[in-house]
Image (cartoon, coloured by chain):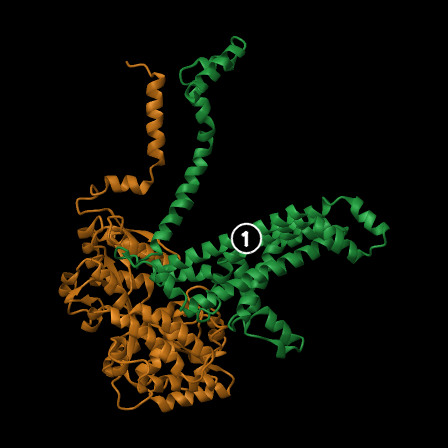
Chain colours: A green, B orange
Amino acid sequence: MASDAKPRKAKARKAAAPEGTEVAAEASRPFGRLAAAAAPYLYVTPMVLLVGVFLLYPAADTMWLSLTKWNGIYPPTFIGFDNYLNLWTDPVFITASLNTVYWVAGVMLLQTALGLALAVLLNTSPLAELYKRILYLPAAISGAAIGVIWYAIFNNQFGILNASLRFVGLGALTQAWLTTPPLNTFSMIVAAVWQGLGPTIILFLVGLQTIPRDPIEAAQTDGANAWQVFRYVTLPLLRPITVVVVGINLINSFKVFDIIWTMTQGGPYRSSETLAVTMFRDSFVSFEFGYGASVAMVLTVVTFAVAVFYIRAIFRRLEVQ
Amino acid sequence: METLTRRTALKLGGAAIIAGAIPPWLLEACTSGGGTPSGASALQLSNDKVTWKAWFEQEGAASKSAGGSSWKLNEYADTSTYQAAIRTSGGSSKVPDLYTWWSGWLMKEIVDAGYAADVSSLWDKESSAYDKGLRDLFTFNGKTYGAPLYFGPWVTLYNKQVFDKYQLQPPKNWNDMQHVLQTLKSKGVTPLGATIDGRWPAFIYFETLLVATDPDLYTKLMAGKAKYTDPGVVEAMNLWGQLINAGYFTDPSSVTFGTGSSTFLTEFSQGRAAMLQIGSWYEPTITGAGMKPGVDFGGFIFPNAKSGIQNSIIIESGPLVVAANGPHKSDAINSLGWFMSKAGQEAWIKATAFTSARSDVASPSPIDQQLLADMKAGGYQQINRYWEATPHDIVETAIDEFAKFMLHPGDPMPILQNIQKKADSVWATIK
């Protein structure tokens, strides 16, 4: 019977172990078997508690809160799915959803494409080490500081960009970069891409430097030009790294907050909010915690669904290959 | 003598580690109540005014010297986080003894929730020194729940040197004001500072122009007895639009004059912008930029845009509140009583250079001295600022709509309809 298996196994271990060894000693102690079985779980417990307390419990609490109306003063009132129903007719939520799509598409496309292009150029550059360090510097700056820097660049009247355009006689090209929707969202995407470019370049460089030379040399021998080698040999071999880069950019662009908050606070008139900013504003500025929680749940579900769909699609493609 | 065994050493060491790990505030809380015979030695004061830290510390020290409790500060850099902290802790014993808040509808929420202690007795004691209109800002259902932490009439601050350069005088009526606006504009000086930075300033010229055209309508609108789509409001908005289209305001998307960065100060001090409609609490900021009040800059009451209406001035006064559930409620009430006294206010004004709400404490600002004299001479009624005067849910929608109007002035009706739609839903829930 199964219940006899463990004591029989312990006896077998003890019988097999040479006398005086640690295993023999351990197996013979009353709590030795229990400790040995529990040890792996004990090592994992602190992290499980951390994740449970700081992730799972708040997530469950947010889910509950999204079904209530709560202003932080009086106890929450259960209202069912009213918050979710109101979301779909809320123009602010619709604008924020659209802005989130712009962010996801913009960061993914711009950061990935630009990162790859720069990595390809740096891969054969003699000054690669220097340029890598320079290009990585923005990644070391906090999102809030990035927002302050780019606010000074994009400010209508005092910003460096408009001042430079006027200086070179291109005053007609000046724009209200941060107060004209959706231009304000695209301007902030530029700031975010500037910050995230460094790590993207590093990852692509790692990928490029691990590509074996043989397929490239074979293609060149067959008469392929540089673009054909890149398109049909290098790019496919870069796929594992590209999956990682796109995945990271996808998740980061869904949850962007600090750059937006420091540059526009989601304004003017809530025109540049993303779902993360709307969630914050509804909860902590308007004190509609239940409504804000419903936005948080929508954002979580969408991010999770997109990530799962993306990963499954990639792995399916890899299996086919 | 007992020998120090391993077990004893472990017990002692463990106790020392635990004691060291306990936060000091918890130790203090466990031992509090045993301060000086007069009560708690230090009262917790929470606030979101980080730039006022030194002032609070000075006032707390003065309170201690006067035989009361000192103030131990708990500051929040972000107003939203601060409001959330007080709202969620107000009903518990974890609430601070004293905290700053806002008057009007924002205060009504915490009063209705039972978070604020009744301090009517303090006002009764000092009734001759404070204006009844000011007390009304903190009074609900016949009881008063806070003391004025600051008192700020809203004033039009102007660059005196620019005015002198173009032979301009502070306007006494709307014709004078138009002359000032046109002259400044023709000389390449932007007359008025305006911004949407920080969101809240977007209401400034709405309230200013509505009070300058129909103060009774403003009061009714704040109480939900008038609509944003009423002709009087539309008229004020159209006036605002005309002034914007005439180029009388700074670019609201570029200029800032918040408590953080302030690009307006540079424009103002260098004479490129001439005036700013703001609370008198902004004067120390301008003084801090190197301009002397009464010499380099002055102030006047924004003139009525229509004749025959009641002289009115917008005032702003935020309360210092005693937490109803605070751990040292009676000591906090005593401390607030001292703060309201002449001695307390003199110490506060010495620290801040604000104007006291007490009529028997002289203002250190020559601008405010003249302002208060003009208010008295002109029989000005005091009207609460928009931010506090109407339910905050309406304000949050309105400031975004006003920002839209400031950036794209045109037909105000769609904007006013949006605000009224929100107002209707909010007033429907308020009994």
Residue depicted at x 48% and y 63%: A274
Q: Quadrant of the N terminus of chain B?
A: top left
Residue depicted at x 34% and y 59%: A81
A23 or B356, which lies in front? Answer: A23
Which residue is disc 1 drawn over? A309
Left or right for B102, reference A191: left
A268 or A19, which lies in front? Answer: A19
**Which residue lies most toward the front here?**
A1
Residue depicted at x 45% and y 30%: A41
User: Secondary structure under badge 1?
Assistant: helix
Give me the chain letter of mark 1. A
Residue depicted at x 48% and y 81%: B190
Identify whether B147 is placed above or below B88: below
The 10 Å Cα crowd at callout 1, few under 14, some 14 to 19, many 20 or more, is few
Q: At which x and y percent is residue A128?
A: 73, 50
Q: At which x and y percent is residue B247?
A: 48, 84
Left or right for A278, reference B125: right
- The answer to whether residue A274 is visible is yes
Q: At which x and y percent is residue A170?
A: 65, 77
Identify whether B152 is placed above or below A140: below
Identify whether B176 is placed above or below B385: below
Q: Across the whole image, how many numbered discs are drawn on residues?
A: 1
B262 or A180, which lies in front? Answer: A180
Q: At which x and y percent is residue B96?
A: 27, 51
Identify whether B305 is placed above or below B334: below
> Hey, which quadrant is residue B26 in on the image?
top left
Residue type indicated by callout 1: Phe
